[in-house]
Amino acid sequence: GGEAPENRPVRRGRGGEAPENRPVWRGRGGEAPKEAPRPAGAWGRSPRKQTRPAGAWGRSPQENSQFQGETMRHASITRTTGETSIELHLKVDGNGQAAVNTGIGFLDHMLTLWARHGLFDLKVQAHGDLHVDEHHTAEDVCICLGRALDDALGERRGIVRTAHSFVPMDEALALVAVDLGGRPYCVVQAEFVTPRVGMLGTDLIFHLLESIALQGRLNLHAQVLYGRNDHHKVEAIFKALGRALDTATRLDPRQADSIPSTKGVL
């Protein structure tokens, strides 16, 4: 019929090598036989690489968020009272950049390392009645931080939700466990031997963590298992809080776009 025969043997030369520039066998019309369509997964390319499923290996939280039809998870909070004026910007899917200016050096230090270890991007500009004391400014900054976290997470679809972290700081060891289930509660077990660290009173640590938990609608349990230096104890708490929240806020590809609760709402 003029068609090229299937499995046609190759003519070889005296040395057994196939001749170079071998002419193509053509059919009656002179056309070269058409190449069969390449099947999916042929020639070393796996179907998984050709069409990667949602939430597949190597997908960043930003990509997961965009795949789920969400915008980047971020929030901006402005709070102005007769005691303070605060602007705070939080990006959950960040890389740990922070620019914090509260007028309270030790609080700036704690929030900066919280962002760095939790891989959050955080900007804070605060002005408060520090001529009175640090209480109002520190409290309102943490209120804004909790609100920003709550706003950025929205309905909290697809998140891991619960996590914990142990963090050592020299001789001190802290544990923080969180649940972003929408039920605010805070328990802090820590003993401090000095009245303040820098410009921040150690009695405020409990209240600051409680403010984050209440406004962020999360369970927050913090415990200093042991330690001597109060600076190290507080620093271990804030680092552990950042790392626990980093894990709890991650998007789990197995959750897809579902609410991580049997109730269907958080």
Image (spheres, rainbow, N blue to C red):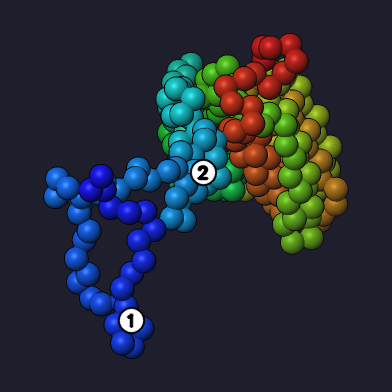
Front residue of 45/235: it is 45
With 13 as the anchor, is 211 left or right in this view?
right
Q: Earlier in the sequence, mark 1 or mark 2?
A: 1
| Residue 5 visible from this viewpoint | yes
Q: Position of residue 100 (x, y in %)?
A: 47, 41
Can you tell which of label 1 and label 2 is closer to the viewer? Answer: 1
| Residue 214 visible from this viewpoint | no
The furthest residue to the bottom: 15
Residue picked out by circle 2? 48
Residue picked out by circle 1? 17
Q: Is residue 7 above or below residue 13?
A: above
How would you rate the neighbour count of disc 1 (Cα within 10 Å): few for under 14, some for 14-19, many for 20 or more? few
Front residue of 210/180: it is 180
Q: Is residue 266 above or below residue 237?
A: above
Front residue of 61/43: it is 43
Q: Position of residue 219 (x, y in %)?
A: 74, 25
Label 2 element class? helix
Dot 2 amino acid type: Arg
